[in-house]
Image (cartoon, helix red, strand yellow):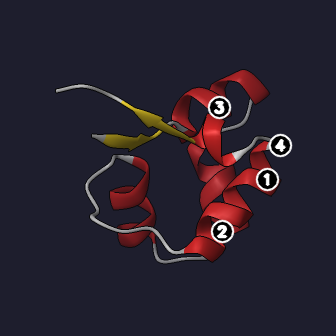
Amino acid sequence: MVKLNALALLEKKGKTKYWLYKQLGMSYQNFNRMINNETKAIRYENIETLCLLLECTPNELLVFVEE
C-alpha cells in the first residue's frame, strides 16, 4: 500500500499540520483525509505543492508499506 509520509516530513521540518493546511488552501475535511491516508487519490498538483512546501521529492513523500 502506498501511504503519504507528510506527517514525518513535517516533524523533520519543525512545522505543524495547521501550517501545512493553511499553505495548501484546501478544505480541512479533504486535508485531514489526505494527511491521515484516508483518501483513495491525490491530485498531481497537491503532490507537487506538498513536495515544494516540504522540500522533498515524491519518493520521500509517498512510501510503500506492506500490509
Give yes or no for contact between labels 4 and 1 (Cβ–Cβ under 8 Å): yes
Q: Nearer the viewer, mark 2 or mark 4?
A: 4
Residue tagged 4: 55
Q: Which residue is mark 1?
A: 53
Q: Which amino acid type is shown beneath numbered disc 2?
A: Leu
Q: Quadrant of the C terminus?
A: top left
Q: Are marks 2 and 3 in contact (CB under 8 Å)?
A: no
Q: Which residue is mark 3?
A: 9
Q: Residue at x 77, y 29 (%)?
A: 13
Query: What's the amino acid at mark 4?
Result: Glu
For the residues labelled 2 and 3, the Cα–Cα distance comes to 15 Å
Give the labeled residue for mark 2. Answer: 24
Q: Are marks 1 and 3 in contact (CB under 8 Å)?
A: no
Q: Earlier in the sequence, mark 4 or mark 3?
A: 3
| Dot placed on the residue nearer the N-terminal end, 2 or 3 | 3
- Mark 1 to mark 3: distance in Å? 10 Å
Residue 34: image location, x then y, percent = 40, 58
Give the x, y percent position of residue 20.
66, 54
Q: Is residue 21 above or below residue 4?
A: below
User: Residue 11: x and y, percent?
Assistant: 64, 25
Q: Alpha carbon of mark 4 to alpha carbon of mark 3: how far?
A: 9 Å
**CB under 8 Å between discs 1 and 2:** yes
Residue at image point 24% right, 25% down: 66
The answer to whether the residues at label 4 and label 3 have Cβ atoms under 8 Å apart is no
Secondary structure under tag 1 reads helix
Q: CA distance from mark 2 to mark 4?
A: 14 Å
Position of residue 13 relative to residue 54, above or below, is: above
Label 3 sits on a secondary structure element that is helix
Is residue 2 toward the left or the right of residue 44 in the image?
A: left
- Residue at 68 percent across and 56 percent down: it is 50
Tell whether label 4 touches label 2 (CB within 8 Å): no
